[in-house]
Amino acid sequence: MRPLKFYGSTTVGERGQIVLPITLRRELNIKKGDTLIVIGNPHMKNITLFNEDTMDKYLDFMSDNITQLKSKIRKK
């Protein structure tokens, strides 16, 4: 697993908007109009952003693994 990378900081604007640091946008190929999925944990007060395509692929991967695990459990 690769370590997390610090891209800088941003400030929440008057309308609740943030600007993603340019190095982050360049490295992750985030462009104007891209959809990002926002997931948060209110207890830890953190948020995570996912690229829509990446999140879709991740959910497919997890779904496949869950299906395989259920199949193995049912065989026991």
Image: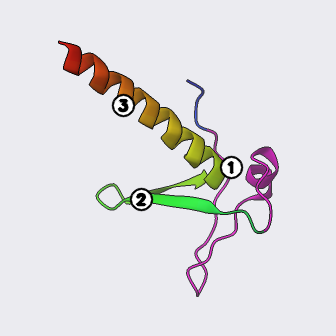
The disc placed on residue 39 is none
The disc placed on residue 66 is 3
**Distance from Cα at disc 3 to Cα at disc 1:** 33 Å
Mark 3 or 2: the one toward you: 3
**Distance from Cα at disc 3 to Cα at disc 2:** 23 Å
In this rendering, position of residue 68 left or right of residue 28: left
Residue contact between numbered discs 2 and 1, judged by CB atoms under 8 Å: no
Q: Is residue 42 found inside the magenta-colored segment of the image?
A: no
Residue under label 2: 40
In this rendering, position of residue 55 left or right of residue 47: right
Asked which quadrant contains residue 5, the reply is top right
Residue under label 1: 7
Residue sitting at x 58%, y 87%? 14
Q: Position of residue 57 (x, y in %)?
A: 59, 41
Q: Which residues are magenta?
A: 5-32
Q: Secondary structure at mark 3?
A: helix
